[in-house]
Image (tube, helix red, strand yellow):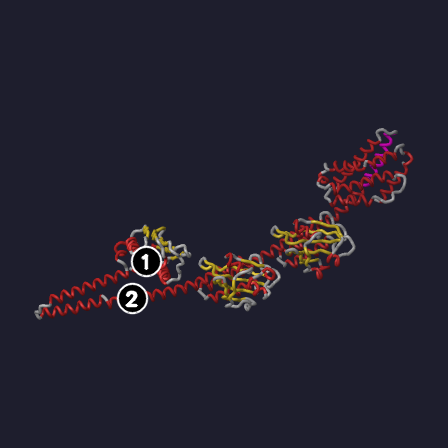
Amino acid sequence: MAVYACGVGAGLEAEATFLAPGWDALLEGVRREGEWVVERILERLHSVASYAELDDTIMRPRVRLNFEAVVGGIERRRRPLPSDPTDRFIESGSERARQGVPASDMAAGWRIGQDTIYLVAARLAEEGLHRDRLLREFLELLMSWTDFGLIAAAEGHRRTEISEVRRLADEQAALRRVAMLVARGVSPTEIFSAVSDEVARLFNSEHTAVARFEGSEAVVVGTCVGIRGPWVGWRVELEDPLLITTVYRTGRPGRRWAYPFGPIAKYLAAGEMIGTVAAPIMVEGKVWGVMIVWTPKELPPDTEHRLENFTELVATAIANAEARAEVERLAEEQAALRRVATLVAREASQAEVFAAVGDECARLFAAEHIRMVRFDGDSMFVVASAGLRPKVLPVGTRQVLGGINTASMVFRTGQPARLDDYQTAASGSIGEAVRSAGMRSAVAAPIIVEGRLWGAMQLGSTRDAPLPPNTESRLGQFTDLMATAIANVQARSDLATSRARIVLAGDEERRRVVRDLHDGAQQQLVHTVVTLKHAQRAHQQGGQDAAALVDEALEHARMATDELRELAHGILPSTLSLGGLEAGIRSLASRMSIPVEVDVRVGRLPAMVESTAYFIVAEALTNVAKHAHAPHAAVTVRRDDGLLHIEVRDDGVGGARVDGHGLVGLRDRLGALDGTLRVESPAGGGTHISASMPAALAESAAAATG
């Protein structure tokens, strides 16, 4: 290049004495038209495919620089140039190569520049003297300098292409090495360090890092080897004008050319300008973190794109690690649920089930506080406690509900609750007690037993980071099992109590029947037998009183029959036995002192069904007569989809006790037939008793017992 430049300079010097008049004016005019020339060249470059993809703001400075270099060379034809433009043209070619412009398109661009400059010169020389000679000399010099510039630019293009091939090879090798680490499933920490080292080598930087976004901060999780010690673990607030803040907000790569400041300046060359490029790490469509590169010089234009190739591998490694962790977590959670479910299926005690739930939750959720509480009116009391700090609100503690705390939140809404800022937001007696133990975040899930809010399961952590976002749903699976265990215990207890009541009621009924038989019909029958024996003896002896004794015996027999009939009526009324459920209910209604509307839409039913329905109505109407002070009542019986539905309503004072002896007995009767009883009795709103039982099942049971 230097030899060629000297040759051009010598040739120009030899022809200097033959320059036409008006030469200086022509050059001055061409220079004045420089902006028009630059804009015209840019406009014409759009017809070349590779140039059309480049932004004019990138191209304009280089076109203007090349124009000045060419015109300056022509203008200084008589004396040595103050600076050799060779390096300037070589850099122009290198820049085109980096921009992806092939050598053929670059040559076409130089010809466009040459033609445009000559077009201006021809227009300016139109009116001057010696026009043809002037233009011929200008064209010769212009072609010499543009050829010189093109040859130098081609050399720069060639050098850059060679270095670009090497760079691409190095980059692909680096990507392969990182990809192999990802494929082997190494930890994300190793990936962060490996990527930082590879990027540092590729971009000739001593400062590269990977940071994870956590709330309003960026936490450095990996760096290149030169700064690995002091930087890892650093936290930086996401605030303007940091480039990483822009990346966090936009999810797009960016660059900045500025002085280092803040904590970064301590480890970078303070006082020198640094070029910074950052690319986001996207995991499952969200900005997980950022990859950053700092250098003392401005980084190439394609740095963002090249950096994204590495961030994609980092994102894959993170996603793979999270997927593996999630699979392992799900497997552990399902195993824990199976262990608890096995205890529930074995009908283990409530204490055993909670102990297992507490151990599993402590392991799965890393919670120090684990409690099960039961709601009672406006209070809660702790029925079980586990974890590392079971002495905080120990078993048996009773606290008034209220304020801001997870137990009160569940009590108010019946939904899972979370409080991530317990130290600042918690209130109420429960909140104060737990906050004093250092709890920072807490989650609670309701325990629903047979459709009613029974209590809650609470998890608490003293760590700075809140409990994971999905803790509520995961904890809900354990509270469902806990609710089943509680329901099983209650069902067993209720069944035992019901059986005891049925046995006692049966024994009492048998004693009543025996007593009534002994005191009534049995005595009459004994009298009948004794009188008949007297009549027999009188007849054998020919006495006159035999007939009178027979009449007396007959009277005793009649009285015994009446006693037996009345006793039988006390067990099951004749109107029910003979006329069915409608007749029995109407008989009950007729004995009421208030009007009772009867609507029975069923025919004859099995005896067990009819008797159970009859006693439900009898008990309900008895309660109306004794307690309701109602002006009216209504009884409805219907059969629907194999179920028998009985309803008794009144418009009395309401407030009936659902735990009364009579209603408890009805529940026992219905429970024996898989039936249900529901009582609604708001104060001042009357009472509504509804019962349902499976008639088909009752028929099978009746047939079996018959």
| 641 to the left or right of 462 | left
| 500 to the left or right of 222 | left
Spatial CA span between label 1 and label 2: 21 Å
Foreground mark, 1 or 2, reads 1
Count of numbered marks:
2
Amino acid type shown at disc 2: Arg
Element class at badge 2: helix
Task: List the residue tagged with mark 1.
Answer: 618
The answer to which of 324 and 255 lies nearer the viewer is 255
Residue 590 in the magenta stretch? The answer is: no
The crowd level at tag 1 (other Cα within 10 Å; few <14, some 14-19, many 20+) is: some
Q: Which mark is residue 531?
A: none
Amino acid type shown at disc 1: Ala
Report the quarter where the C terminus lies. bottom left
Q: Earlier in the sequence, mark 1 or mark 2?
A: 2
Q: Position of residue 220 (x, y in %)?
A: 68, 58
The magenta region covers 130-149
| 632 to the left or right of 342 | left
Task: Report the residue that reaches farthest toward the right.
Answer: 17
Is residue 161 in view? Answer: yes
Is residue 700 in view? Answer: no
Residue 131 in the magenta stretch? The answer is: yes
- On screen, residue 173 above or below 30: below
The answer to which of 533 and 272 lies nearer the viewer is 533
The answer to which of 165 and 76 lies nearer the viewer is 76
Q: Main secondary structure of the magenta part?
A: helix
Residue at the image point whose x is 20% and y is 64% from the top:
559
* Among the 4 quarters of the image, the one containing residue 49: top right
The crowd level at tag 2 (other Cα within 10 Å; few <14, some 14-19, many 20+) is: few
Report the quarter where the N terminus lies. top right
Element class at badge 1: helix
Q: Which mark is residue 510?
A: 2
